[in-house]
Image (cartoon, helix red, strand yellow):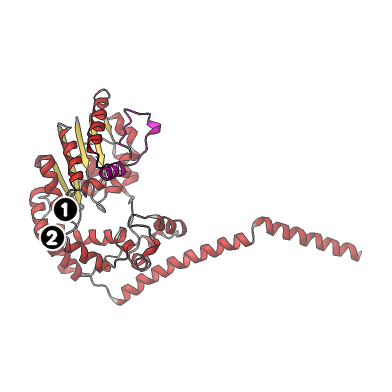
Amino acid sequence: MKLILHPGHGKCGSSSIQTFLYSKISELNKLGIYLPDPNFRFSFEIEKSSLEKQTPLWYFKRLMDEDNMESFEERLNQVLEKAHKSNCKMILISAENLGNIRGITKGRKIHEILASHFDQKMVIFYIRRQDDYLVSSWQQWGHKKGETLKEHIDKALAEHEPDFLGRVRFFEEIYGEESITVVPLHNQALIKGNLIDDFCFRSQLSISEESNLQIQTSKANKSLNPYLCDILSRISSIYTDPHDNSIKKLLTSYVDTEKLLFLNDPKILSQEQRNRILKEFDDDNLILSKKYFDCLTSDDFANKKLDVEDKIHQTLDDEIEGLKDIISIQMEIIIKLLKEQQQKDNPPSKKLNIKREIKQLIKKVFKNKI
């Protein structure tokens, strides 16, 4: 039995891959490829209608919270026993927290159990430029903790995060170097310059190009406008925790101008800050590029050649324009709320009643005159 493991790192395309995979479960099942649901159940052992089309992220979180690895091994044995009796050729697991548990003993045990139960294993791990990652992770989690972008970066660099090299070495140790594929999110490294095509090719998923088209042009788990995140970081008590997406959902329901809501401005991070971040990971990127993506040098991965010619500087005008976008978003929300209130105060039924009363009054007046 073959295992394809995508221990997706946060803000490295995981949501896009998972959205695609779980939208194609029926097609994948026909090919003998099966994915677990949030309770680590598979469609070859339960009714498909009972299967939840979501990743097993919370299942693995519960495992670590309860520290019950024996139950996981028992569950995996049950799954594999039933898999061998079905048309299953491959188990495909994609879960972000499997990429972030290398320093946790319980997390390590999960990987050791997975590695020991499959005779064929492939781990596909996507990484991205560390400066871009840190901006994106601040937009996703950092601002919800009340951190400014600078504070978020300082804290991450003090802990040498994102430590892509450390995670790759962890996977090498557990699954074997020959089982690891590391791919940077860069057009020159991705098959056809597209994340979904790349994942399908590397994991040998024979899904027609036509079925990929819908996902290719969409971005799952988009980040809020960084200028908006800066404002929200000042009122972070509105969030219950860094994983609270309720504010984003609320804003999406009130703002039709998605271009402004999800606008990404690279100038939010100065060239000086970018250079500082990339310098921290120079050695890591060199090791990774030499070993895993020789189609791309570490300098190309970090776009250093481009930086020399086209330095990024945020001017006061840029910041003013960014704040104008935020005011536009606020104005759209205010107008929508005013319209909603107006409709509540003057519902169509009330307007009809008023018209009726006016007509009756006019008739009465004219009748009295006659």
Q: Could you tell whether 198 is left or right of 212 in the image?
A: left
Q: Which residues are magenta?
A: 40-68
Q: Is residue 290 visible?
A: yes
Quick one: 78 or 368, which is closer to the camera?
78
Q: Secondary structure at mark 1?
A: helix
Magenta run includes residue 49: yes
Where residue 46 appears, as percent x and y from the top left, is 35, 29
160 with respect to 92 (left or right): left
Residue farthest along the right direction in this orientation: 370
Q: Quadrant of residue 255?
A: bottom left
- Amino acid at the residue labelled 1: Phe
Element assignment for label 2? loop
- Is-magenta flag for residue 10? no
Residue 325 occupies quadrant: bottom left
Q: Which residue is mark 1?
A: 164
Q: Can you identify the residue that label 2 sits on?
A: 281
Please report contact status of discs 2 and 1: CB closer than 8 Å, yes or no.
Answer: yes
